[in-house]
Amino acid sequence: MKQPFSIKTVVRPHIWNLVPYSSARDEYTGKVGVFLDANENPYGSVLSADHNRYPDPHQVLIKQKLAPIKGVNPEQIFLGNGSDEPIDLLVRATCTPGQDSLLIMPPTYGMYEVSASINDISLIKVPLTSEYQIDVSAVLAAVLPTTKLIWVCSPNNPSGNLVQTDAIETLLNNFNGLVVVDEAYIDFTAVNSWNQRLEEFPNLVVLQTFSKAWGLASLRLGMCFASPEVIAILNKIKPPYNLSGITQQLLLEALDQEEKKNELVAHILLERSQLADELNQLGMVQKVYPSDANFLLVKFDDAASVMNFLLEEKIIVRDRSKVILCEACLRISVGTRPENEVLMNALKKFEQNSVIA
Ligand SMILES: *Cc1c(COP(=O)(O)O)cnc(C)c1O
């Protein structure tokens, strides 16, 4: 059994001791005053709307509004410039380049590996099982004393499935570093977020995003939920004004539209099941994997030719055929009804062409 978890043991010592940049607005939180502290333009901006003042570095209003929606406290929330930002900050906060390691379970989201490479962190890869579940004993056996992070993606990209709860629990209970559960696709499932169990597991970190279900990919908005201690470390090392004022303003408006998000999700889920049915009727489709997300992993007789044909038709899907456990697979995002029809017509045309040839 592992030692009681202490956040200090996973944070790089110089970051633990770091005194963060204190922004001009940190010393005075009032709204009214004569603000001559931040070298802003006092007249306004070149655009008609006013963008001349630095935004709230702590995103207080957003966190107040988001906390009850997510069932957490504001101190358990970090907001980033996409999920990319907390992914990178978690690596930089915990892993010393050339020394520490992190563990991923392919096939999974590519950014974990990219972030490890950028930061010169060695990567331990323990593939998922053929059912795309965690091989718990292999993971625990592969963990080194230098391993600071384990990345879990649930629902997993690109396989689309949820990862078993008890496997994640076992990692949380037996690993002395942080277990990060990336829930980018959680809104497409009926399960509870792991963010409801933060009190139980001090080494749990949960990632979510506004890029998928909420339809805000262009704004770049990622969420990270963890203990206040972990969140404080991320806040300490983030660029002070990491979310622009416009982004914060739009997000405040978006948070009033949770119903709309749920409607969009319901549409996508309907389309997902129809698209899966239609794909299953094609002879060249070997398998449509069950999906808890807004995409389908599809195994074809000849994925490369299908991919090329679709590109000629200006239909872009994601080629995962060279990825471990995804041989011959394409990952297809669920589109609108007309988009899915265009896709299906193209695939039928491809199938007819190959019969004739
Ligand atoms: C799409 C996706 C994200 C979202 O990334 P953003 O930077 O927030 O747009 C995160 N994790 C996974 C696994 C994804 O597929």
Image (cartoon, rainbow, N blue to C red):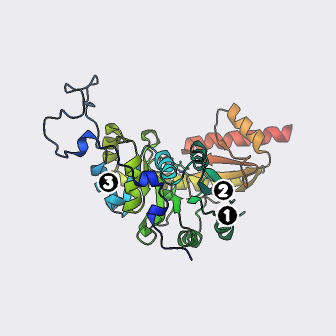
Q: Nearer the viewer, residue 355 or 173?
A: 173
- Say what secondary structure mark 2 lies in: strand
Up the image or down, 298 lies above or below 338; here it is below
Identify the residue under disc 1: 142
Up the image or down, 71 lies above or below 345; here it is below
Asked if one can make out residue 198 in the rendered structure from this viewpoint, the answer is yes
Q: Earlier in the sequence, mark 2 or mark 1?
A: 2
Up the image or down, 120 lies above or below 192; here it is above
Left or right: 351, with 335 as reference point: right
Q: Residues within 10 Å of mark 1 (few under 14, many from 20)?
A: some
Alpha carbon of mark 3 to alpha carbon of mark 1: how far? 37 Å
Task: Tell me which amino acid carries mark 3.
Answer: Lys
Residue at 50%, 58% in the rendered image: 186
Identify the residue under disc 2: 124
Report if the beta carbon of the residue with label 3 is closer than 8 angstroms to ligand 1: no
Residue 110 appears at what percent x and percent y? 61, 47
